[in-house]
């Protein structure tokens, strides 16, 4: 069952596919309106069209300040207000530290962390104007532990977790809540690309033994966007099948 989001207008970055597309569905099913943004124009327009009149798409590179201003202006022009922002756009994958290049590290930080900063920065006056709101920043299990092969990615996701706390503290008086969500392995084009398989037994490293599905992340985001989370700010919500809770029995005993 979708979270109650009647009357709320939410911007979701990276909404063309994967987790962002599932968040768009969650918001519309909950009675809200959503502006999906992405660099993937064709896919984004198709994803929004499939959600009907409660959804729109706008091209958006999250590293561009001009794009951010245009996205907020478009949301207000189309839907009359903004109540929420989900900073979901991101790029994954990585190398061992030794082979990670400076150029790739910088690029990942620029999209995954600087992009979130510009989003929060741009959202503040707009959300205040409409009486406050909810910002959900998509970090990762890699922002809760030191995960091999994630040099730039893991650093960016730890940064998103920290930035979310700072924003929660600074913005609480303006009635803006800010929380981070930390997905574990979830079946989307991003993890498909690294060979992860869906279903039972597909991810033995996590206590639940499977990868998640996008709807399981979207429902946590829906909760944080909704008034059911009215007293929740500065929280970090792991949605990861127990991956960051600790090593599995199999890992500890070999059985
Ligand atoms: P995905 O690759 O399917 O979707 C990410 C979207 O972000 C894509 O549509 C992509 O075009 C968009 N994007 C990339 N760069 C952009 C930019 N500069 N400006 C605007 N949009 C841009 O991946 P996903 O699995 O749906 O990931 C969504 C978020 O969840 C990411 O922040 C990712 O790091 C995080 N996450 C995913 C998992 C997982 O297992 N899938 C786990 C932890 C965290």
Image (cartoon, helix red, strand yellow):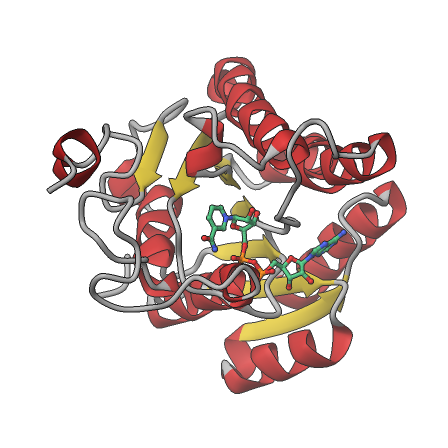
Report the front residue among 183 and 7. Answer: 183
Asked if 161 appears above or below 127 in the picture, the reply is: above
Residue 4 seen in the current view: no
Image x and y of residue 4, in percent: 28, 58
Q: Quadrant of residue 46?
A: bottom right
**Side of 63 where 175 appears, left or right:** left
**Point 60% across, 23% down: residue:** 159
The quadrant the N terminus occupies is bottom left
Q: In the rendered picture of this protein, how many numbered marks are placed on residues?
A: 0
Asked if 233 appears above or below 210 in the picture, the reply is: above
The quadrant the C terminus occupies is top left
Asked if 138 appears above or below 47 in the picture, the reply is: above
Image x and y of residue 204, in percent: 25, 51
**Side of 17 where 117 appears, left or right:** right
Image-quarter location of ligand 1:
bottom right
Image x and y of residue 253, in percent: 12, 32
**Point 56% across, 21% down: residue:** 167
Report the front residue among 81 and 215. Answer: 215
Residue 95 seen in the current view: yes
Report the front residue among 182 and 59. Answer: 182
**Point 67% across, 78% down: residue:** 43
Asked if 88 appears above or below 58 in the picture, the reply is: above
**Point 29% across, 44% down: residue:** 205
Q: Quadrant of residue 99?
A: top right
Report the front residue among 193 and 182. Answer: 193
Image x and y of residue 231, in percent: 29, 27
């Amino acid at each position: 069952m979708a979270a109650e989001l009647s009357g709320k207008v939410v911007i979701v970055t990276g909404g063309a596919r994967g987790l962002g597309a599932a968040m768009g569905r969650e918001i519309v099913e909950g009675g809200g309106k959503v502006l999906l943004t992405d660099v993937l124009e064709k896919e984004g327009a198709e994803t929004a069209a499939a959600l009907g009149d409660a959804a729109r798409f706008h091209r958006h590179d999250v590293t561009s300040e001009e794009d951010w201003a245009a996205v907020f202006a478009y949301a207000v022009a189309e839907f009359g207000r903004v109540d929420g922002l989900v900073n979901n756009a991101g790029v994954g994958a990585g190398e061992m530290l030794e082979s990670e290049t400076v150029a790739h590290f910088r690029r990942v930080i620029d999209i995954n962390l600087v992009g979130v900063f510009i989003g929060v920065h741009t959202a503040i006056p707009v959300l205040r104007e409409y009486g406050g709101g909810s910002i959900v920043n998509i970090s990762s299990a890699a922002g809760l532990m030191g995960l091999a092969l994630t040099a730039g990615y893991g650093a960016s996701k730890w940064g998103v977790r920290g930035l979310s706390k700072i924003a929660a503290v600074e913005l609480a008086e303006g009635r803006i809540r800010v929380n981070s969500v930390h997905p574990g392995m979830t079946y989307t084009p991003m993890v498909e690309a690294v060979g992860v398989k869906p279903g039972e037994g597909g991810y033995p490293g996590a206590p639940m033994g499977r990868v998640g599905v996008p709807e399981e992340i979207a429902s946590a985001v829906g909760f944080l966007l909704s008034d059911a989370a009215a007293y929740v700010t500065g929280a970090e919500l792991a949605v990861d099948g127990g991956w960051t809770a600790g090593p599995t029995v199999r890992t500890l005993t070999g059985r």
